Amino acid sequence: MNAPLNVQESRATSETTDKGPGRPKLHILSLVLLVVVVAVAVASRLSPADPLDEVEVTDPSFREALAAALEAYASLEAHEALPRALADVAVGVEDFADIATAELARLGTAECLVQLRDLAIASPSDTAQSRAQFVLGQHCGSAGALVVAAVLDDADATDGHKVAALLTLELSATDEATDAIIGALVGQSREIRAFAAEKLANRPGERATRGLVHAARNDAEALVREVAVAALSEREDDSVTLVLIERLVDDSADVQFAAVSAIESLEDRRAIVALLGALERLGVSIDPGSGRLGNPGDSGPTLQHARRIALALEKLTGQEHGLLMDRWRAWIEAHRDELGPQLPSPF
C-alpha cells in the first residue's frame, strides 16, 4: 500500500518531521484552512460537496476577508503537507469533516486519495470516517476505488480495515469497485468473504452474479454459501433459480433454508416440482384426518424447514395444502400443463 493504515501514528510522525525552511508546520496549514472554511461556511452556508473556489458570497461584509482567505489557501494547494492538514481538520474538528474531505476529493492528487483512504479505513473519528467513505465512493471514481481495493490485498490489514474498505467500495459504482468486492470472495477470512457476498447483493451486472454463484456453489464455509444464496434472491437472471435448486440439497440446513427463501422471493414457478421434492425428502407428513404429524418424531428444525417449503409452494401456486403431501402431489400432477417447463430437480 502507499501509506500506513495506522493514521494516528503516521500523523504523529509527520508532525515531528515536517519542519524546516519554507515548510510550514502542519498545525499552521490546518489553522489557515480553518480560517478559510469558517469564513466560507458562515458566509454561504456551504454544502459539503461544493468546492471552496466556487462559493458565491453576497454579503459585502465577508467579501474582502473571504477573498484574502481563499488567496492564502490557493497558495497552499501545491504544498506537500496540505493533504495531511486537510485530514487533520477532518479528524480534529468534526464540524468541518464534510468540507475537508470534499476538498481532498476536489484536489484529487494521489496523496489526497491516500489520506481519504486512511480516513475511510482507520480514522479515530467516526464522522471523518463516514464522510471519507462517502466521498471516496461517490466522487473519486476509479482512482478512489483502486486505492481502497489495495487494502483488501494488504497482508497487514485487519478484518476491521477490510470491512471498512468493503463499505467504501459498496458506495462506488465503478467496475473497479465491483471487481474488488468479487475478489474478496476468495482468499479472505470467512467473515470477510461473507461480508463481500452481502455487498454484492444489489450490485448490477453479470460479473457480480457470477461471483455470487461461484460462492454459493463452491465456498467451503456454510456461512458464506448461505449469504451468497440469500444475495442471489436479488438477482434478475434466468440462471439463478437453477443454482438455488442445487442448494436445496446443501450439506447445511441453513443454506437449504436460504435457498427456499430466495426461490420464493424470485417467484420462479419453474422451481415448484423441485420444492415439492425438497418437502418430500424431509419426510414430514400430516394426517389429513386428525391434522397431526404422521411421525411424532418430525419436530423442531425439520418441521420448521418443512413448513417454510410449504409456504413457498403456497405462494408460487396459490394453493394452501400445508404439509398434506398427497394433496400437493395430486394438484401438481393435475396442473402440470399450467405450470409450464420445470427446472431439473436433484430429488
Image (cartoon, grey):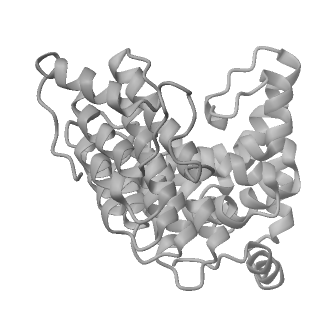
Q: Is residue 74 visible?
A: no
Residue drawn at the location 74% of the way across and 48% of the way down: 72
x then y, percent, for residue 62: 85, 24
Position of 346 compared to 142: left or right? Answer: left
Residue drawn at the location 53% of the way across and 77% of the way down: 2
Position of 146 compared to 189: left or right? Answer: left
Frontmost residue, 312 versus 169? 312
Frontmost residue, 246 versus 3? 246
Q: Determine which quarter of the picture holds residue 57.
A: top right
Frontmost residue, 296 versus 135? 296
Frontmost residue, 283 versus 65? 283
Position of 60 compared to 189: left or right? Answer: right
Above/below status of 290 relative to 38: above
Label tally: 0
Above/below status of 279 relative to 216: above
| Extreme-front residue of the structure | 289
x then y, percent, for residue 314: 41, 23
x then y, percent, for residue 3: 59, 77
Q: Determine which quarter of the picture holds residue 5.
A: bottom right
Above/below status of 211 relative to 7: above
Q: Is residue 73 visible?
A: yes
Position of 293 compared to 86: left or right? Answer: left
Residue drawn at the location 18% of the way across and 25% of the way down: 333
Residue drawn at the location 41% of the way across and 21% of the way down: 315
x then y, percent, for residue 136: 55, 50
Above/below status of 55 relative to 239: above
